[in-house]
Image: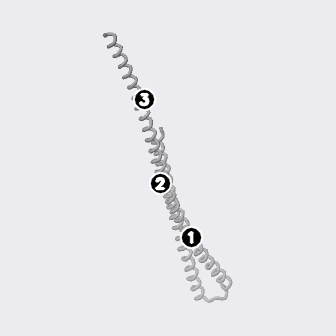
Amino acid sequence: MVFHTNTLHVYSSAQQKKKASAQAKKLERDIETRLQDAQRQSEAIVARFEQDSLARYLDTLDAGLESAVDHIKVLRQTFDEFQTANLALVDSLEKHASHAGKRRRDQSKEDEQMHNGHAEDIAQAFGRFEKEILGTRKMLRKMNKAHHDTTKFSQHLLACVKP
């Protein structure tokens, strides 16, 4: 009977070990499955975030490009004004040179005032042109900084996610 009890005990102990081993394997598979699910979820979150970041970046870039186009249009208009004022001054100088000997002293003063007016127009047009160029540079610097910040943040995020 003692032998029988020992055999039963050994049999029961072996069964418990098999059962515990099976439970451990099942638990290990369950943990592995949960880790894989968590990895897939985190990758999906990162992908969604990257898409959102990329969409925001592209929207920012698109707005910046629209702004750059507007600046270029203003630059073109300002340059055209500058060119018109410059042509008017050249025309005035040519007229003055061709009639210099024939004009009276009073007429020369009027011409000088007219030339000064054209020179002021040119200076103002050039000043506006220069201001628009500076505005365009500032806007391009902001776009470059936004691009750099977005790229840096995306790299940081990817570094956090990659094992």
Q: Secondary structure at mark 2?
A: helix
Q: Earlier in the sequence, mark 3 or mark 2?
A: 3
The amino acid on which the numbered mark 2 sits, given as a three-letter code, is Asp
Estimate how packed mark 3 is, as few (under 14), some (14 to 19) or many (20 or more) residues with alpha carbons within 10 Å.
Answer: few
Q: Secondary structure at mark 3?
A: helix
Q: Is residue 47 above or below residue 35?
A: below
Quadrant location of the N terminus? Answer: top left
The amino acid on which the numbered mark 3 sits, given as a three-letter code, is Lys
Q: Residue furthest right?
A: 98
Give the spatial CA distance, label 3 vs label 2: 40 Å
- Disc 1 marks which residue? 73
Give the spatial CA distance, label 1 vs label 2: 31 Å
Q: Earlier in the sequence, mark 1 or mark 3?
A: 3
Given residues 5 and 44, the one toward you in this image is: 5
The amino acid on which the numbered mark 1 sits, given as a three-letter code, is Lys
- Residue 104's quadrant in the figure? bottom right
Q: Residue at x 57, y 76 (%)?
A: 119
Q: Residue furthest front?
A: 1
Q: Residue at x 55, y 69 (%)?
A: 129
Given residues 21 and 101, the one toward you in this image is: 21
Check the image and tell me how it is coloured.
Answer: one colour
Residue 25 is labelled as 3
Residue 17, image x and y in percent?
38, 22
Residue 70, image x and y in percent?
54, 68
- Disc 2 marks which residue? 52
Q: Earlier in the sequence, mark 1 or mark 2?
A: 2
